[in-house]
Structures are given as C-alpha cells and as structure tokens.
Amino acid sequence: MAPTPGDEAPAKGEPEPDDAEPTTPPPKPVPPAPRVAADTKTPPKKEGVADVEKSDRPLRDSLKLSVGPLTFIPVVLIQAQVLPYVGDDAFAAQGDPADSEGFRLRRGRFGAEIDITDQARARVSFELGSREDGEARIHDAYLAYVGFPYLQAWGGAMTVPFSRSEIAGSESQALTERPLAVRSMAPGQQVGLVARGDVGDHVFTYDAGVFNGFSRTDQFYSGYLQNYAPLGNRFEGLAYVARVATEPVGALSDPIADETHQSPRFGLGASYYYSDGGSRGVHSVEGDALLHAEGFHLLAEALFANVVPKADPTEPTYAVADVKSLGIVAEAGYMIFVDLLGLTARFEYIDSAMGVDDEGDNWVFGGGATVMFFDGMVRSTVEFEHREEMFGLSLANDALIFQAQLAVP
C-alpha cells in the first residue's frame, strides 16, 4: 500500500526508489583471494619412477578400493591381435609378429596391487598362457617400501630398470609392441633387489639393483629368457644394474605417446648392466630421451651390448667369440584428440653382430593409428611393419596387425 503524507520516513539506509543515494556509500565488498588454476597437465606421482595418468581421468581413479589402511587396485591386461597379412618368410623366433596370418593372444594378464598407507606396496600378476609354450607364469611379484621418496626398497620379480620403453610397460606403447631393438636387448623381468629414489619431484631419479643373472637365448632376436628361479639361481650368476634419469621441466606421464597433451617437457635417461653368467658375461648400456609437447611425442633410444663367452661355461652355448650388438630407435607421433586418436611412426636400425655383414643387420619401419576410449583403458591399434635385411637375402617378413587392448588401470 502506498504511504500517506502522515507516514513516517523510511528507516535510515533504506531510501525509497525515487530518493537520492545515501551520502555515505556502503563499504565495498572485499574480493575473494584469486584462485590458482591447477596444472592438470602435471600428473601425480607413481612409484617414485614414473607417473600415473593426468588427474582428470576419473574412471581410472574409481577402480581403487580402500579398506582401512589398504588400497586395492586391479591389474588386467588383454591384448588380442588379428594378422590379415604376414610375409611368407616371417618367423616369430626372429622377432617377427607371427609366423603366418591368423589370430594371436599376445598377452592375457591378471593380478592386483596393494598400497598400505602410502608406506608400502605389493603387486602380483600372472600371464595366463600368453607364452609360446601356452603355460601360465608369474609376471610381477614384489614388495616395496615407498614411504621415503629419496630411498625406496623393492624386492621380488619385477621389470629390470633398463630402457625407457621397457620400463613404460607393454600397455603404454604408442604402437602394438615395444621396439624390436628393445625386445631383443633389454632383459625384461627378473628376480632381485632394487634401491631407487626421486629427488626434487623427478628432477633426478636413480635405480641401483642386483638380480639373478640374465640368460640370453642363442637367437639374438629372441631376446632374454624370463627365469623366475622357483628353485633358486643356478647357472646365470648375478646381474648388476644402474639407471639415472631426469625430467627437469615437469614429470612425464607413463605412456610413450602424449595422450593427455602435456605442456612441453622432456626426460633423459641412461642405464647400464653387467650380467655375470656361467656361460657368458654381458655388458650393456643404453641412453634414451622422450619429449612431450601438447600431444606431440618424440622418442629416441640407443642400446649397445657386448657378450663375452666364458672360458669354462656351465651351460651349452654356441658363442665362441665376443659379440657386440647395436640398436637405435627413433619414434614420433601426435595425439590428434586427447585420449581418443593418435598417429605414430617408428624407425629402427639393428646390428645384431657388429663387424659381420649378414641378415642380422636390419632396419625396421612401422607406423599406425590408435583409437582409445574410457580414459585410454580400451584401445584399438592398426599397424604396418616393414623389415629389411641390409645384407644377404631380403626376406618377406612384413606384417599388418590389428590389436585390441584392455588395460586396467
């Protein structure tokens, strides 16, 4: 109801709409403190050596189950391949994708990882019949104290800290497989003890370990045997491993490809091992570099090995002289859409026996495209690989590969 001439004036500080503004203006509100935007391109830390995916991958984080002080994380890896074309001369024992056209269960892995109040970690996983012999075997089985970042202790069956591509894991490659040079020259998994540390949030990381000795096959491209010593160590002796690495600008995410479009950053690493086996001693060194920049990645690795036969071998061996080997890898790719579509090309030069010109001197060129879904846990890759023998016979061992992968987490 409108006021009459006899009504009282409005209370002070509550003028009528037509009245003049108050003589004393109200105090200005204090602006809130500015919020600093989170750097979503810097992933959280994982295991003191590598980093997990970017923090905006909620599906991966939702897979964790916490019960009191324990956190359980499932470990699943399935890689199934279709090979519609394989060259007539292809031979899997020489590093080719398969012997002929068909289907291949490349990996079937299952297990679990347990974190205990951010102080300890345990992991066990099994390969379920993915090997050529069709038998199940242990892949990882280790315990670790991780409560102090500068000095952690790991023991059990684990990945030997040698080569960036090897450490990244088979599920984290930009193409269907690790480079052939890495599969042939890196020792893979073995039982041992490792001390590792992280100084300055990946500004400097180190690994120093001792393992059961690495047992090479007599075929260079078949790589190393994966011996988990259920009856203890016998003929292989011991192997001593060291690695140092730096990521001075910021921590790199786990995958080789820049799947999450990180801001520009790079990592450098170098590794060495000596395996004092009963039949041969192996000295090996490698260096690697990886660049991530807004979806682009560039990987370079060089590996060198010198195999020296023992004068009194404890096992039969075909090696009668020193054999020096060299592998060089260059890979580049671009993730067109974050966590969705990427392209990669890779070139390798491999000399299985330096000083001898034969079919063991190869160059390999491959490339393909990857489509991924569900935070990258499900992906499909198509890859074509051309392999050329530089001397001797030129073999028909090219291959076209389609691979479907489920990797958890």
Image (cartoon, rainbow, N blue to C red):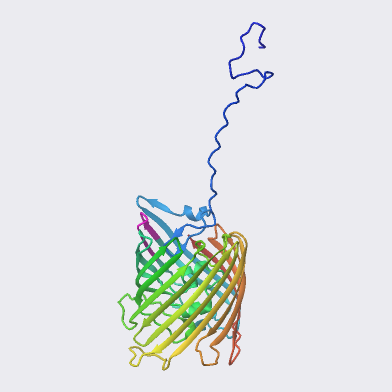
Q: Which residue extends farthest right? A: 18
In this view, 31 is above or below 389:
above
Judge by depth and name the residue closer to the eye, 358 or 403: 358
- Residue 175 appears at what percent x and percent y? 57, 71
* Residue 101 left/right relative to 320: right
State whether residue 317 appears in this view: yes
Q: Main secondary structure of the magenta part?
A: strand
Q: Count the marks: how many?
A: 0
In this view, 333 is above or below 217:
above
Q: Which residue is at 37% across, 56% downward?
A: 118
- Residue 212 appears at what percent x and percent y? 34, 77
Q: Which residue is at 35% across, 88% downward?
A: 315
State whether residue 97 appears in this view: no
In this view, 139 is above or below 262:
below
In this view, 313 is above or below 26:
below
* Magenta-colored span: 113-124
Judge by depth and name the residue closer to the eye, 360 or 93: 360
- Residue 142 appears at what percent x and percent y? 36, 66
* Residue 138 left/right relative to 169: left
Judge by depth and name the residue closer to the eye, 283 or 265: 265
- Residue 375 appears at what percent x and percent y? 54, 57
- Indicate the quadrant where residue 137 lies: bottom left
Q: Quadrant of the N terminus?
A: top right
